[in-house]
Amino acid sequence: MPSMSLTGSLAIGRSALSASQVAIQVTGNNFANVSTPGYSRQGVSLVASPDQRFGNGFIGRGVQIGGINRTIDSALQSRLWNGVSDEAFAGTAQQFLTGVESITNDLGPNSLSKELGRFFDAWSELSQSPNAEGVRALVVQQGRTIGGQLRALRSDLSQTRTQLDGQLGAAVNEANNLLNQIAAVNVNIVNSENGTPSANSLRDQRDQLVSQLSTLMDVSVVEQPSGAYDVLVGSTPVVLAGQSRGVRLETTVVNNTTRVAVQVIQDGTQLNVASGTIGGLLQQRTGVVDRTIEKLDNLASQLIFQVNRIHSTGSGSSPLTSVTGTLTMPTADTTRPLNDPANGTLADLPFKPVNGGFLVTVTNTQTGATETVRINVDLDGITSTGAPGTADDSSLASITASLDGIANLNATINPDGTLKIDAASGFTVSFGEDTSGALAVLGVNTYFTGRDATNIDVRAELQRTPGLLATGQVINGSRNDNAGALAIAGLRNKPNTALGGDSLIGSWRSNVQQIGAESSAANSRAQSASLVRGNLEAQRSAVSGVSIDEESINLLNYQRQYQGAARFISVVDELTQTLLGILQ
């Protein structure tokens, strides 16, 4: 019995030595990874070996390694991933709102609002001196300046959107790569652990990959009994154990507008990415960037249309003998009613003609005799039978025929689909009281060309001949030399229903103020999100991070345990030698 007890004592000492060695190695590994990103402190779980019956009692058999486990709070880790996503989302919003705010800055001396003011000032000055060639040239130049600024702003915003789309595509590709890596690590973990959660380094690696993924999109994680992670965006899985379902950026064009969406590669499910860099990019693209471009285009379209409505019914110092519209139409559209949805030319325009008409006056330059004819523009959407429909409504071809029926006037449609009106020799033509807006839409005697901020410009004929500027209008049968210029100058503060009741300048100022307010709010959100993420990071470090002081104490304890075990074995060995000497 004594020999068995001494042998058992040696086994106990050996188990203590082994346990101490493992514990010291784990402590050393913690020291080595004190600065390793994503590393979770590991701890040794020591458990007593099962007791052995000895006479009427039980005696211990030493110590065993119960496991080497990561020190981690799963709920805290999940909150940290959410915090990382929110910080990336807020930072992305801050970046692009600041950029758009810089582009649309309305405080400089050459801001869009100030240039619009100068444009209307030039028309106001022209109304006081309608025949002054220098002022006419200034009006043309100011129109070209405002057109150039609108085009430049539109280009800068489009480049911002292109930059955003590039970043979005790169972020989605990066997310897809991370999903593949997470799936691969899942496989390694399941194969390594074989049901026992001990692949700590692999688990840390996987958590770090999820952290990187969280900067891109908001994800949630469900750990399966096998140890594999299922990763979800919302309720849609993107990783199932060892299989990545993949993500991609899908781009579609709807009504000449490019739309983007993040989809699952495997089945095309659209993901609702609400946070992270990708969520922030998606929100800014459909939010401030697209909205600002839309508002800029609306402003330019209304500036074009409202100025042209007035200008097309005016007259300048050089009487019109021939005028060609600027709107081109495919041959098929020339015979389609202007309000027919199948008329692609008009359907794509941001401004449309309405039911009404306009006056055409032909003047004999020798006698001064005039003939005024009203051209009806039927766009009421009702057929001759009283049923809803556009079949009987006006088309470019029907308007051209009506114009051509006026004495001493010839109207044709050019091969490019533009309307051409020529007065007979010795006659001039002018237009007035256009309640339909058809002349402005067709580009007859207009000031601006183009449809929005992408292509707004002053009509080429006016650039060559400022005398064609329509400063005058016929009011109640009498010509007023500055009525047209005054009416255009009055657009400065005139409410516009297409702009939500704001004036042209007021609409843009409201938009700039909104961007400024959103930018300020984004700065606050970014700071707050950063503080929250930092706080969560500090909490994780307190739980899972390596403390040099704590590990130093552990090292001393394990060192003493090892020394004690070694001394114990030495004593047992001495006793064994004594016993063997007695037996000899």
Image (tube, rainbow, N blue to C red):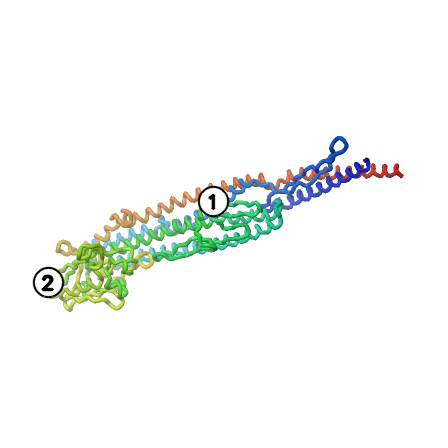
Residue beneath label 1, please? 86
Drawn side of residue 74 relative to residue 367, left or right: right
> On the rendered image, what quadrant is the C terminus found in?
top right
Q: Answer with the quarter of the image where residue 145 lies.
A: bottom left
What is the three-letter code of the residue carrying label 2? Ala
What is the three-letter code of the residue carrying label 1? Asp
In percent of the image, x 66 and y 40: which residue is there? 66
Which dot marks residue 369?
2
> On the rendered image, what quadrant is the N terminus found in?
top right
Q: Residue 434 at what x, y percent from top left? A: 19, 56
Number of dots carrying numbers: 2
In percent of the image, x 83 and y 38: which residue is there? 576
User: Mark 1 vs mark 2: which is more N-terminal?
Assistant: 1
Q: Answer with the quarter of the image where residue 483 lies.
A: bottom left
- Mark 1 Cα within 10 Å, few/some/many (few <14, many 20+)? many
In percent of the image, x 40 and y 45: which residue is there? 519
Mark 1–mark 2 distance (CA, rounded to whole Å): 75 Å
Q: Give the answer, above or below, for where 47 lies relative to 411.
A: above
Drawn side of residue 287 relative to residue 552, left or right: left
Q: Residue 12 at what x, y percent from top left? A: 75, 38
Res. 37 in view: no
